[in-house]
Image (spheres, helix red, strand yellow):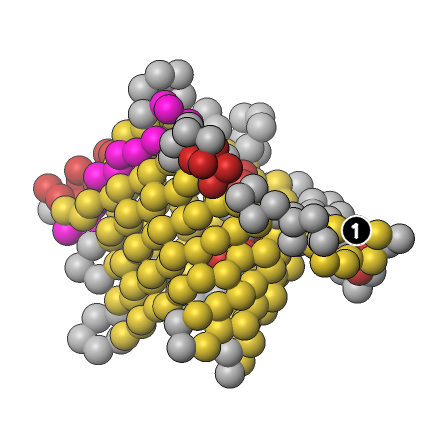
């Protein structure tokens, strides 16, 4: 009983003082490496919106058919429910843990079949796999090591063609391990620019979540040099986290559910 009361107080405090979140975190399909090897078919996320009483909701679906991966998602604001936000579409091929995938977005659902309306896709390839079980209790885990480049394709006369002047160093490398069984664990390490590394400027971002039963403790530098601390609660289909940016004093939260 004391544990349930503690969880409720932590959750209520975070929701009361949070002022915003990062909408880019809402959709996995916005990153091509997240288009493959996912443990869900449907995922929804929620963060505070731009004004009081407004929330931003992200919804996405994922399907894997014999190694062909498809994902689509979008965001909208509650309580408006206006589907006027960009729609993200991802396609990927995976076999034996290896994958190649791409992700792009189009301004609206009405233009989803118009290839000329899409932004230039981002391409990723590497190793990704997941395990999922429902024996005794539901659990899942996912591993990813990926290379991501935004310049593989270019737009020419309304069509996408291979870029003959591709800069292979203008790319991102991402390593991520995530699991949820008796507790939630996350370790992510990202090198945003290989070119910077070659030129002698080694920049990186990272995140770490360590479980304490259903509760987990979060620490990291997810976007820049700012240190972020957090506390969350999760099981195999639900995850809620509140984060505090030490440098800016900003509090943010995000809730996600998947099945």
| Position of residue 215 measured from the top left corner of the image (x, y, whole percent) | 20, 45
Horizontal relation, residue 157 to residue 209: left or right: right
Rendered residue at 28%/47% (across/down) = 187
Q: Nearer the viewer, residue 116 or 247?
A: 116
Q: Is residue 246 above or below residue 257?
A: above
Q: Nearer the viewer, residue 243 or 152?
A: 152
Horizontal relation, residue 252 to residue 72: left or right: left
Rendered residue at 84%/52% (across/down) = 156
Q: Is residue 221 above or below residue 180?
A: above
The residue that mark 1 highlights is: 155
Rendered residue at 56%/42% (across/down) = 170
Report which quarter residue 219 is drawn in.
top left
Q: Nearer the viewer, residue 147 or 33?
A: 147
- Residue 106 seen from this side: no
Horizontal relation, residue 4 to residue 152: left or right: left
Q: Quadrant of the C terminus?
A: bottom left
Report which quarter residue 76 is drawn in.
top right
Q: Magenta residues, as a range?
A: 213-226
| Position of residue 234 measured from the top left corner of the image (x, y, whole percent) | 28, 51
Find out whether residue 217 is within the magenta segment.
Answer: yes
| Position of residue 189 measured from the top left corner of the image (x, y, whole percent) | 34, 43
């Amino acid at each position: 009983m004391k544990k349930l009361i503690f969880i409720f107080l932590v959750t209520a405090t975070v929701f009361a003082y949070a002022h915003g979140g990062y909408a880019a975190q809402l959709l996995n399909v916005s990153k091509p490496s997240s288009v493959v090897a996912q443990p869900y078919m449907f995922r929804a996320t929620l963060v505070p919106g731009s004004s009081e009483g407004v929330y931003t909701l992200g919804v996405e679906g994922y399907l894997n058919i014999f190694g062909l991966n498809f994902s689509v998602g979008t965001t909208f604001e509650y309580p408006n429910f206006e589907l006027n936000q960009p729609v993200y579409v991802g396609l990927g091929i995976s076999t034996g843990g290896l994958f190649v995938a791409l992700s792009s977005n189009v301004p609206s659902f009405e233009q989803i079949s118009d290839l000329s309306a899409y932004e230039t896709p981002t391409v990723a390839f590497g190793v990704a796999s997941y395990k999922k079980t429902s024996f005794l209790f539901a659990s899942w885990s996912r591993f990813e090591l990926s290379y991501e480049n935004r310049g593989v394709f270019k737009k020419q006369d309304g069509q996408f063609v291979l870029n003959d002047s591709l800069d292979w160093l203008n790319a991102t490398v991402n390593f991520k391990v995530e699991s949820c069984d008796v507790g939630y664990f996350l370790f992510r390490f990202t090198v945003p620019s290989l070119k910077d590394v070659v030129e002698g400027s080694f920049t990186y971002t990272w995140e770490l979540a360590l479980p304490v039963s259903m509760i987990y403790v979060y620490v990291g530098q997810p976007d820049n040099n700012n240190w972020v601390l957090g506390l969350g609660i999760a099981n195999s289909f639900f995850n809620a986290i509140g984060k505090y940016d030490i440098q800016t004093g900003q509090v943010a939260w995000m809730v996600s559910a998947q099945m």
